[in-house]
Amino acid sequence: MRGWKAVLAGIGGLVVVAVLYAVIVPPELLRVGAGYSAKITCSAQVLQGRDPDEVLETDVQAPGNPLLRAFWVSADRQAGRVRSAFAGIIAPTTAEERVGLGCATFPDGNLAAARDQSAPSAPGPSTSAALWPTGAQTDLTGQGRFEAVLRDDALTGPGMRAVVVIRDGKLVAERYGDGFDATTPLLGWSMTKTVTAALVGTAIEAGKLRMDQSDLLPEWRGDDRAKITVAQLMSMSSGLHFNEDYGDVSDVTRMLYLQPDMAKFAASQPLDHPPGTHFSYSSGTAVLLSRIWQNAVGDTSTALAWPRRKLFDPLGMSSATLETDASGTFVGSSYLYATARDWARFGQFLLQDGKWDGRQLLPAEFVQRMHTPAPTDRVYGQGMTWLAGPSNQQKAGDDARFGLPADTYWLEGHDGQTVTVIPSADMVVVRMGLTPSDLNYRPQKLVAALLDAAKATAHASSNIPSNSAEDR
């Protein structure tokens, strides 16, 4: 018995030592988990008005790594702050709100940096009595076929939070999941990359940047990275090393949750290939583009106000909040929150080749280039769009087997976020949700059904007898 007691005491001592070591030197995986749970919970609390415990359980723990179930959060709603830690004590990380910039984590513990950043706040979803897109009202008369498609749960998919359908520039159908509505800002994840491409376009239109510009960052001077151009970054062909694997601690998770200066981390990566020769999808690239256009347009306050002044306000995207990291760089890879209706405004803006309310905000040729195949990959556009819908192995022409037109292109984000733009059908479809990729949901089927509904609606309308005086 004395021997067994000694063994148990030894094991207990080792456990205590291991816990103490983890508290003092927490493993990177636990630090990533704490950063992720703090950031997502804080943004949902601040921007969506949701309960932090519900967000932790539903958005963070349910679809994620089993380890995430051992993270506890404590929220201070008045301060706009959330603290997360493994088992409540290991790898504590805090995320905090900044005026107009959503939440950021502060891996270095420098919370004072949060108070040094601000931008014009999102006014909030439109309450105007005008019809969408000018206001918040809709007229769905005669649009029953679209509504019938959206009632099909198999088409809208598991975890659906919002679907909005735009046809001929009008909102013709929408549906929302439980707990969400037309006023709820929703996280676009990697759809944010396409918005970043448009922001690069606004800097180019303002004469602050060029697509062929190189020598983009001071830390690249003197080596081959100085040869990287804006166009190569926009096409994901910079040649920079970056591991985009989300299954463990990788470059992308390390950047998003362990680095106070994400652009500095992405810029420090070496070249794996000569610039312009190899396609490699990279969230680090989109963050670099944010830092590059921010540097180009002016001082910090000018840059932080730029997205609202140059893009969100002109488009009426009054719910949109683009978040920055702790250093003040917009997280242009991942962190734009906007209502489904505002995501639809952005999709319609692309469909109209950069024109909105009579103004050409971006040159038509720039927007067309955004969905022209990249030189190094036929399924990716030159402005961070996808030329095929989500699948395990995206290939050019994949959408044709669903019956989608050849000019269809996509914004695509983690966990089932998509905006589908179909110029030939004058249609935009927004589908938002919490739908992990292992569920194999394919929004192409939803879009195909909506295209069929559009054809049927147009056919029915053409068969309605006219009551005009001329016809009589």
Image: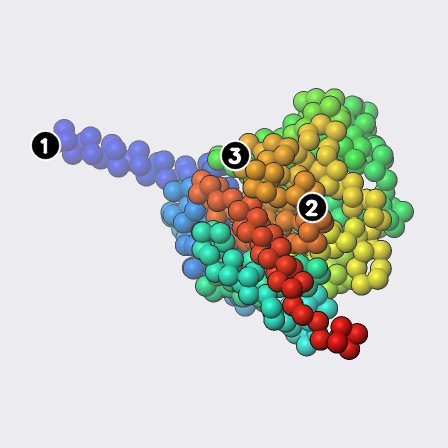
Q: Quadrant of the N terminus?
A: top left
Q: Earlier in the sequence, mark 3 or mark 1?
A: 1
The residue singled out by tag 3 in the image is 392
For the C terminus, the image quarter is: bottom right
Q: Position of residue 311 (x, y in %)?
A: 76, 57
Q: Which residue is mark 2?
A: 194
Residue 123 appears in view: no
Q: Position of residue 72 (x, y in %)?
A: 41, 52
Dot 2 falls on a residue whose secondary structure is helix
Badge 3 density bin: few <14, some 14–19, many ≥20, Cα 10 Å: few
**Three-letter residue code for mark 1:** Met
- Seen at 45% across and 51% down, the residue is 154
Mark 3, mark 2: which one is toward the viewer?
Answer: 3
Number of numbered callouts drawn: 3
> Residue 296 in the image: x percent, y percent?
83, 45
The image quarter in which residue 407 lies: top right
Q: How is the image coloured?
A: rainbow
Amino acid on which the number 2 mark rests in the picture: Thr
Dot in front, 1 or 2: 2
State the mark number for residue 1: 1
C-alpha separation, residue under disc 1 versus residue under disc 2? 67 Å
* First reached walking from the N terminus: tag 3 or tag 2: 2
Determine the residue positioned at 75% across, 29% down. 375
| Residue 439 x %, y % | 44, 43
- Label 1: few (<14), some or many (≥20) within 10 Å? few
Which of 143 and 114 lies nearest the eye of the viewer?
143
Q: Are marks 3 and 2 in contact (CB under 8 Å)?
A: no
Q: Is residue 349 left or right of residue 147?
A: right
Residue placed furthest toward the left: 1
Query: In the rendered structure, which disc, 1 or 2, sits on the residue that comes first in sequence?
Result: 1
Q: Is residue 374 above or below residue 57?
A: above
Label placed on residue 365: none
